[in-house]
Amino acid sequence: MSKLLEEKGLPSSVEIERWVLGTVLLNDSLFVSVAAVLTPDDFSLEKHRRIFRRMADLAERAERIDRVTVVNELAKRGELESCDGLSYLVTLDDGLPHLLNIESYVHIVKEKSLLRRIVLTSQDMMDRALMGEEDPQIILAGAQEGLLRLSNEDTRTGVATPADVLEGYPGGLNAFLDPSKAPRGLSTGFLKLDEMTTGLQKGDLIVLAGRPSMGKTALALNVAWHVARKPRRKVVIFSLEMSKEAISTRLVTTAARVDQHKFRVGYLSAEERRRLLEATGQFRDSGIRFDDHAVLVLDIHSKCRRMKAAEGLDLVIIDYLQLIQSQGKTQNRNQEISQMSRALKLMAKDLDVPVVVLSQLSRACEVRPGDHRPQLSDLRDSGSIEQDADVVMFIYREEVYRPDREDLKGAAELILAKQRNGPVGKIRLRFLHELTKFENAAQDGDATD
């Protein structure tokens, strides 16, 4: 414990806590508004926590809350003596101002409670770090989780009325009455996908899944490039498999429409070099950001929060789910994936941006006789991925299974298997092997935003 903490003690305001409890004893109709903000743990003294719990018990049974009923409730549970008896309850309103200001009293108690939690969370991090028995990344992630939880608790809002919903509806009342006037989500650059989803929506967790070599990363990078080239749009790519240098090379060569093999061996024409130079300039000015070090959801969440505060954030892409490490110990991999998918959904809601997570599929679709197209049951390691995701898409190329069929070369499907707020179906795309790039099918034309 630090010297300053030893001298000052944990933040609290015992007198104000007494006034909150004393005010409720004088006017029990105020308990509902107090309980809407405070919990027993917000009080610094154990006897105050016990008194507040017994008040809550009485309120739950719709009984009066006064000195006699609270004393009786404490006595029934054998807690009266630990709360200093009736004599203490009588003094709870001592010094209480004649003009009651219960909202201010409650606010002060809540503030002190938050300060105590910050101190205790920090102390826990210091203790774990000094013990040195855990991986530093696990300790850091735990500290971030604790502080994020406190932040979320501090910004909680109450239940919303219909008027609140209508007033806060994106696009206003006109958009509520006519969805065609509602703001659209981020365009992906793929016309049919944008048409079916109205774009990538804020707060949505979008899972893009497929077997190896189907083109998950390529499709995600195509979307990232399309979004980030728009003025003031910011996209962050968390790559747990490829380095940021490798991703950058793919983005630039794809944008320049240069064969990646030719680029690697250096056999480029003057025109190709010109296009590469132009694409490199576009890449330098784009809103794409990279991170190839984060391996924990909490680390990803924390970095996204900082980026959003510093320069804005419009889209998060994570490649890929099964490479994310679990923070704590679980009994099996399914539980780990379930925890991570839930954490990613909460992250999307907290950041209020679409989060695209790439995911592997099990081998079930490959050994399935006949049609190898993926199904929701093929999501690897956990059914919770399907449950938590707002949108689930599969990338599928039949040519992977039938390489001898020339007519299948370049043919691709994006299977929209789940959409919480829209239709499902298949979207035909074209895959350019030499560029590792997906394009709209010929009849769809070119996408613009």
Image (cartoon, helix red, strand yellow):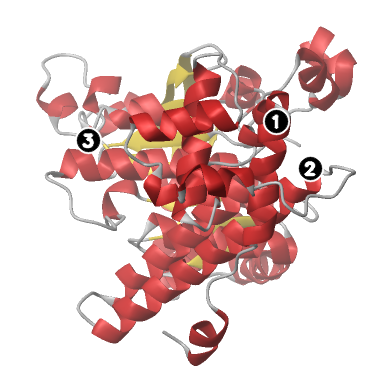
> Residue 304 occupies which quadrant of the picture?
bottom right
Q: Is residue 221 visible?
A: no
The tag on residue 103 is 2
The correct choice, above or below, for 111 with respect to 26 in the image is below
From mark 3 to mark 1, how far is it between C-alphas? 46 Å
Which one is closest to the eye, mark 3 or mark 1? 1
Does 442 sit left or right of 382 as displayed? Answer: right
Which one is closest to the eye, mark 2 or mark 3? 2
Amino acid under label 1? Ser
Front-most of residues 368 and 339: 339
Residue 201, image x, y percentages: 63, 32
Secondary structure at numbered mark 3: loop
The correct choice, above or below, for 3 with respect to 320 in the image is below
State which quarter of the image contains the C terminus.
top right
Reading the image, the residue beneath label 1 is 33
Does 392 sit left or right of 372 as displayed? Answer: right
> Going from the N terminus, do you reach mark 2 or mark 1 first?
1
Residue located at (63% from left, 50% from top): 154
The tag on residue 414 is none
> Going from the N terminus, do you reach mark 3 or mark 1 first?
1
Secondary structure at numbered mark 2: helix
From mark 2 to mark 1, how far is it between C-alphas? 9 Å
Amino acid under label 3? Arg
Reading the image, the residue beneath label 3 is 380
